[in-house]
């Protein structure tokens, strides 16, 4: 099965290469990213090969987890050379910003044998680790063929994606069998990985490194700067609706309207998961004739007074949660699997979500164990829950503390445990 995939990918390379070359030339600001996708490793990386540990983190969330793991490795084993790769534009930008000063950072090659072979030959990793479910056959096989130990960190399979993985189990099993170490984010995820073909003796439950990274991420200065920029009156309550997906804009606007009818003067910050959703949100707001502004217009000084701010900029949502008196995390009123409900919890902010949270079921369970946050099924329920918090200042503060404690419960040194396991695996090469 793996040979079939590899041969198909090898043939597809010759079809894809002209398009990749064209993208590299057109997107000059992302030229290094596109070169990396084609397997062309930056000179600063190849010059320092071989690398002891190469960690692949596909996008922003995984880069945050990698950051926590890298920090933990450097504390225990500062002599090891560490390299982090990312696949997406946002992930690579985040990695350069966070990690450039403490480890190597490069784009990850696309999973064509030609691109992967070129990159792996330049990096020469002694140990290769990938975060979550980034199971790329060519990359895994090429690093193993070079003699590298291999690990899956933060391993997780959501209940939503499990049926699809089971249907392709004959293809997934030989990949999972090739990992020397699998660090599962929870016992449930460990069981699913073993069901799919992971070797039970190589699977360890270590917790989710993303959550340990969240504990130390809040910067109290950042929300204050945002509040000044946005000109938000301190007497007004702030509700942040983060990672909104298409179809959630209407119920969220309805909930905000109900809060206003109940007597709460509230500023609503709406942050879509993808910028292409911004026009959809704007259209829904204009249809209701509410006063709103785009974040970019406020920054440019051209915005008019408003009650709703649409966040048309990537990378600031986490700090916006630090402004919030209550937060809703999207991708959950519609069947998209949800987003990270513990990001607001890092700020001790009460957090709500819809019923579709398959991608973050462990985080939701942690909140439930602390009677923190909560599931809402529609705008009326969301408005009622937020109103109850705003009517009871002490209760709102207690709810926020409970959310933070839920994060502390689930974080539990996960990045440190995975870093230690990965370091032991690396050291076992010499034994």
Image (spheres, rainbow, N blue to C red):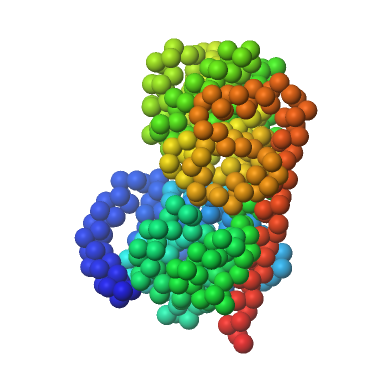
Figure quadrant of the N terminus:
bottom left
Please identify the quarter of the rendering in which residue 320 is found.
top right
Q: Return the residue found at the far bottom.
A: 431
x, y percentage for residue 410?
Answer: 67, 53
The answer to whether one can see residue 171 in this image is: yes
The residue sitting at 50% across, 48% down in the picture is 358
Task: Say whether residue 411 is left or right of residue 257.
Answer: right
**Residue in the foreground of this view, choosing between 20 and 248:** 248
Is 296 located above or below residue 96 in the figure?
Answer: above
**Residue in the foreground of this view, choosing between 184 and 97:** 184
Is 179 located above or below residue 33 in the figure?
Answer: below
The answer to whether one can see residue 48 in this image is: no
x, y percentage for residue 168?
Answer: 35, 65
The residue sitting at 65% across, 49% down in the picture is 366
Figure quadrant of the C terminus:
bottom right
The residue sitting at 57% across, 71% down in the picture is 203
**Residue in the foreground of this view, choosing between 358 and 50:** 358
x, y percentage for residue 267?
Answer: 59, 20
Label total for image: 0
Is 33 located above or below residue 245 in the figure?
Answer: below
Q: Return the residue found at the far right.
A: 394
x, y percentage for residue 281?
Answer: 42, 26
The residue sitting at 26% across, 64% down in the picture is 13
């Amino acid at each position: 099965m793996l040979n079939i995939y590899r041969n198909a990918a090898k043939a597809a390379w010759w079809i894809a290469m002209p398009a990749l070359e064209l993208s590299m030339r057109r997107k000059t600001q992302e030229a290094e990213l596109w070169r990396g996708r084609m397997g062309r490793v930056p000179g600063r990386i190849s010059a320092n090969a071989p690398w002891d540990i190469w960690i692949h983190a596909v996008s922003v969330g995984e880069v945050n987890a990698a950051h926590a793991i890298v920090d933990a490795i450097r504390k225990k084993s500062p002599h090891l050379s560490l390299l982090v790769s990312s696949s997406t534009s946002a992930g690579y930008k985040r990695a350069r910003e966070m990690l450039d000063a403490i480890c190597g950072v490069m784009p990850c090659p696309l999973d064509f044998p030609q691109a992967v072979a070129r990159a792996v030959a330049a990096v020469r990793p002694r140990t290769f680790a990938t975060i979550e479910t980034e199971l790329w056959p060519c990359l895994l096989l090429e690093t193993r063929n070079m003699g590298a130990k291999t690990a899956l960190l933060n391993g997780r399979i959501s209940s939503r994606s499990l049926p699809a993985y089971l249907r392709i189990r004959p293809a997934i099993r030989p990949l999972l069998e090739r990992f020397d170490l699998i660090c599962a984010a929870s016992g449930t995820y460990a069981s699913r990985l073993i069901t799919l073909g992971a070797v039970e003796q190589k699977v360890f439950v270590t917790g989710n490194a993303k959550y340990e990274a969240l504990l130390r991420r809040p910067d109290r200065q950042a929300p204050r700067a945002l509040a000044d920029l946005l000109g938000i009156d301190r007497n007004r309550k702030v509700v942040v609706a983060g990672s909104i997906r298409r179809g959630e804009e209407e119920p969220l606007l309805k909930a905000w309207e109900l809060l206003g009818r109940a007597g709460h003067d509230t500023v609503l910050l709406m942050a879509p998961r993808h910028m292409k959703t911004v026009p959809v949100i704007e259209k829904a707001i204009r249809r209701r004739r509410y006063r709103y502004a785009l974040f970019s217009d406020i920054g440019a000084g051209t915005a008019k007074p408003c009650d709703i701010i649409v966040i048309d900029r990537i990378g600031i949502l986490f700090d916006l949660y630090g402004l919030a008196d209550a937060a809703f995390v999207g991708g959950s009123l519609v069947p998209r699997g949800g987003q990270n409900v513990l990001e607001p919890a890092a700020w001790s902010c009460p957090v709500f979500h819809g019923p579709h949270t398959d991608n973050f079921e462990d985080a939701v369970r942690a909140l439930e164990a602390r009677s923190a946050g909560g599931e809402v099924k529609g705008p009326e329920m969301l408005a009622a829950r937020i109103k109850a918090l705003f009517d009871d200042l002490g209760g709102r503060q207690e709810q926020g503390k409970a959310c933070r404690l839920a994060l502390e419960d689930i974080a539990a040194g996960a990045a440190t445990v995975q870093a230690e396991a990965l370091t032991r695996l690396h050291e076992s090469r010499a034994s």
